[in-house]
Image: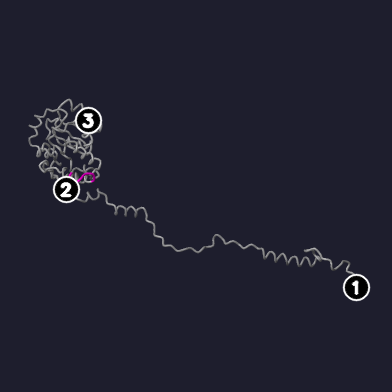
Amino acid sequence: MADDLGDDWWEERPVGAASSPEGSGDEGGGDTEMKQEKTAPVPAPSKKAKQPKECFLIQPKETKEESTKTRKWRKKKITDILAKSEPKPGTPEDLQKLIKDYYSSNRSVIELEELNLPDSCFLKANDLTHSLSSYLKEICPKWVKLRKTHTEKKSVLMLILCSSAVRALELIRSMTAFKGDSKVMKLFAKHIKVQEQVKLLEKRAMHLGVGTPGRIKELVKQGGLNLNPLKFLVFDWNWRDQKLKRMMDIPEIRKEVFELLEMGVLSLCKSESLKLGLF
């Protein structure tokens, strides 16, 4: 006799239906463990884990002291060089060379030759043993007679070019033994207007003018100063400032000096009516 199963055994059951509570518990637990093992996420590498790096040679960084030392060693300043070198008196050849160097970029060879000054227009240069008064007495021994005959206004007999107003005042104080009763004109821009200087030059005849090339050039341009009666032009050549720079070492002043020379000074030198001195 056949057993009565109660249900048709050939009927298909839905997928995932549990056949018995015991079997379903055991088999279900095993399936979930398998699924967890299969779907378990792979742990991300920790940030602290060291990654392989390429090897580079890194040079040690220079400290500020070392960098400043190397810079000072590489770039020598003109003041350092001049401080170690002995002072040399200026010569006419120094002025001639500066004129050629200044105009060499924009003048032809023929024009540069025309700028050459004759040796006869140069007075004896200071050998660094003179004071200003003793030097002026040497280059102009007949000054007293010369200044007495000078009566022309808007002009001077002697011009002294220097780098600053302070230096001009120093030179005026140091030439007391030479100037005597001569009338001295301050020709610099500090605290003095151009029109005031023009009025003073128009009022009376002056003998000596001490100042900067920039202001003297401006007076000549405005017609307040006539250079034709000028007999002596003296450069404060050898004096050095706190930075050990001479007047012609400063580009701005050097430019103004050469512009002043072109305003009639060079032609007066070639005609031998004007003499140049390097103090």
Q: How many other residues sit within 10 Å of disc 1, few (<14), some (14-19) or many (≥20)?
A: few
Query: Residue at (57%, 61%) from the top-left corner?
Result: 46
| SS at badge 2 | loop
| Residue placed under numbered mark 3 in the picture | 222
Return the mark for residue 265: none
Q: Is residue 103 magenta?
A: no
Q: Is residue 11 left or right of residue 215?
A: right
Check disc 1 and give the amino acid type: Ala
Up-down relation of residue 136 to residue 22 (above or below): above
Query: In which quadrant will I find the C terminus?
Result: top left
Check disc 3 and give the amino acid type: Gln
Q: Nearer the viewer, mark 2 or mark 1?
A: 1
Query: Are the residues tagged 3 and 2 within 8 Å (C-beta)?
Result: no
Task: From the top left corner, tell me how far across and down residue 162 is, in percent.
Answer: 20, 38
Check disc 2 and give the amino acid type: Lys
Question: What is the distance, in whole Å, between disc 3 and disc 2 at their CAs?
Answer: 37 Å
Up-down relation of residue 231 to residue 105 (above or below): above
Task: From the top left corner, tell me how far across and down residue 142 is, in percent.
Answer: 7, 35
Return the mark for residue 2: 1
Query: In which quadrant will I find the N terminus?
Result: bottom right
| Residue placed under numbered mark 2 in the picture | 88
Query: Residue at (90%, 69%) from the top-left corner?
Result: 4
Q: How many other residues sit within 10 Å of disc 3, few (<14), some (14-19) or many (≥20)?
A: few
Q: Is residue 96 left or right of residue 72?
A: left
Residue range in magenta is 105-110
Query: Are the residues tagged 2 and 1 within 8 Å (C-beta)?
Result: no
**Picture quarter containing residue 121?**
top left
- Of the pair 119 and 173, the residue shown nearer to us: 119
Question: What is the distance, in whole Å, between disc 3 and disc 1 at their CAs?
Answer: 145 Å
Counting residues from the start of the chain, the first of labels 3 and 1 encountered is 1
Query: Residue at (9%, 37%) from the top-left corner?
Result: 140
| SS at badge 1 | loop
